[in-house]
Amino acid sequence: MPVGPGPRPTPGPAPRYRGRFAPSPTGPLHQGSLVTALASWLDARAHGGVWIVRMEDLDEPRCVPGAAEDILAALSRLGLHSDEPVVRQSRRHAYYEQALASLTARGLVYPCGCTRREIADSLVRVHARHRTLAYPGTCRQGLHGKTARAWRLRVPDGDAARIRFEDRWMGTQIQDLSTEVGDFVLKRADGQWAYQLAVVVDDQAQGMTDIVRGADLLDSTARQIYLQACLDAPTPRYLHVPLVLADDGEKLSKQNGAAPLVLDTPAAALVALKNAAAHLGLPASLGTLSHGDDFLAAATQAWRVRYGR
Ligand code: GLU
């Protein structure tokens, strides 16, 4: 019988705030990613905490050569410096392997031989009336002659599947992993580690107490909270900031025309920071400051007043 996560450890005294900005180096920093970088930096500073940059460079087909260095150079021009050496996920395969092995040993993981096409077909059959996109658990009981392609985490059924958390910006969130997500992938069919596994392993290894990131990842958070429980990792606090949208209504990205930030002068960097602060709802009075350091100090104070819980 598969075993679920054990009881959560009793919390001790609150650890010192540790937060991060975790860009995927798929292109240069743009106004959308700057909003996330700035929000995570301000939240860490407002709490007297540590802010670390982590390069999420695992998805080899999507990573662009040189993008990681471009992002780091842009952050530096903006005055946002990682307090600890930058961590690169591409050097951490052994830790993901270890986590997968420990979950497998506990009967929580199974191989899946479904192709995307097969999953789409069975979803239409099984879930057409419910309009959900949850993986229907086809390979839960075995591969039935298929070849293992991906590795999936079993999610619980019933009440245990309902994950509830308080997002500091978005409020109470509830997701039923069983009906809304299904058993999710930890290692992909192309051999790459899934974002969900790597992010949970690294947030735990780096002792992250607070996650501040874009609202596109709100939907991944319940999966990560469940995975934390399975790996006996503490659950950090979460704050998801509203996305910067492109003209097509989608998250601003390289694909829909996000322009790389041009930060060739301190004045240009200051304008980019001011635009990001305005998106985050910080007071317009910040717009009058004319020096980057003064701006960051005042923005930290403004963030503390608004979101400093
Ligand atoms: N690497 C992810 C991204 O660039 C962010 C991951 C996270 O903050 O959890 O969208």
Image: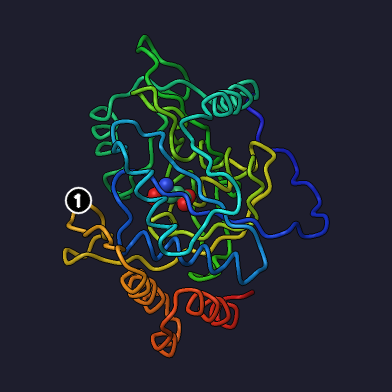
Quarter of the figure with the C terminus: bottom right
Q: Residue at x 41, y 49 (%)?
A: 23
The residue labelled by disc 1 is 255
Q: Secondary structure at mark 1?
A: helix
- Residue 29, given in percent of the width and then of the height, sits at 33, 55
Kind of residue at disc 1: Gln
Whether ligand 1 has any atom under 8 Å from the Cβ at mark 1 is answered as: no
User: Can the viewer see residue 128?
Assistant: yes
Q: Residue at x 25, y 57 (%)?
A: 260
Quarter of the figure with the N terminus: top right
- Please identify the quarter of the rendering in which residue 45 is found: bottom right
Q: Residue at x 38, y 43 (%)?
A: 68
Badge count: 1
> Residue pushed farthest top?
145
- Residue 18, given in percent of the width and then of the height, sits at 64, 56
Q: Residue at x 45, y 36 (%)?
A: 184
User: Can the viewer see residue 180?
Assistant: no
- Please identify the quarter of the rendering in which residue 205 is found: top right
- Residue 272, given in percent of the width and then of the height, sits at 33, 70
Q: Is residue 87 above or below residue 256?
A: above
Tell me which colouring the rendered structure shows.
rainbow
- Answer left or right for 28 relative to 37: left
- Please identify the quarter of the rendering in which residue 127 is found: top left
Front-lying residue, 239 or 140? 239
Front-lying residue, 94 or 54? 54
